Image (cartoon, grey):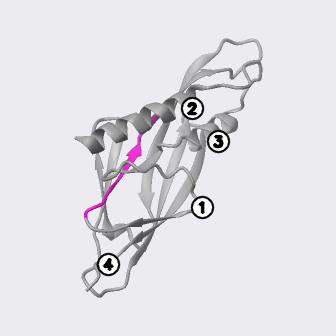
Amino acid sequence: MQIKKVLFVTLFAASLLVSCNPNDTGVLTKADVLEKASNFGALLINGTNGIAYADRNQTIKLSGRQYLIGARILTLENILLEKDGEETDVEVTVSFSVDKNSSSLWKITEQKPDEYHVRLTPTYPKKNEEDYHSIITATLKLMDDEELQVSWNVVLRAPKA
């Protein structure tokens, strides 16, 4: 229960940051909107302890029974897409994939914990085996014609003897 509270507080705080628009008078291109969405702090989080992986330069290290939760839909509020248009809420859809070499190690379950998220559950190495390495990619799409891919390096640690 405590983990769920941390998870939802993290998601709420991150959603507040995403909804802020410091350039209220500026028109954003679709690429700008996708870049803004890709910086959403809770795009990919550790489902076990609630840690958000906003920095894609870090390597995510998982062990034991840890799993990841990815956001499927991001809503950016008060976005101006046309010069004389009105600000509107923009929805960005997100899909997750794993590199071909390690895709058999992962199970991506839709609608876990709810319809706005996916659960990424890894298979861990056995004792004394080498750690497994994966690359998880999130593909962000806006209005089905513009997309952006962001990736994380993931290490699945083997249990110690």
Q: Nearer the viewer, mark 4 or mark 3?
A: 4
Which type of secondary structure does the marked residue at label 4 adopt?
Answer: loop
Q: Residue at x 34, y 46 (%)?
A: 118
Of the image marks 3 and 1, the number of the one nearer the N terminus: 3
Q: Which mark is residue 57?
A: 1
Of the image marks 3 and 2, the number of the one nearer the N terminus: 2
In which quadrant of the rendered view does residue 61 lie? bottom left
Q: Residue at x 77, y 23 (%)?
A: 26
Q: Are marks 3 and 1 in contact (CB under 8 Å)?
A: no
Name the residue beneath numbered marker 4: 158
Mark 1 surroundings within 10 Å by alpha-carbon count, few (fewer than 14), some (14 through 19), many (20 or more):
few
Of the image marks 2 and 1, the number of the one nearer the N terminus: 2
**Residue at the extreme front of the image, as rendered:** 2
Residue type at numbered disc 1:
Asn
Q: Can you see residue 6? A: yes
Which type of secondary structure does the marked residue at label 1 adopt?
Answer: loop
Q: Are marks 3 and 2 in contact (CB under 8 Å)?
A: no
Name the residue beneath numbered marker 3: 35
In which quadrant of the rendered view does residue 115 lie? top left
Name the residue beneath numbered marker 2: 18
Q: CA distance from mark 1 to mark 4?
A: 22 Å
Residue bounds of the magenta highlight = 65-73
Q: Nearer the viewer, residue 147 or 12?
A: 12
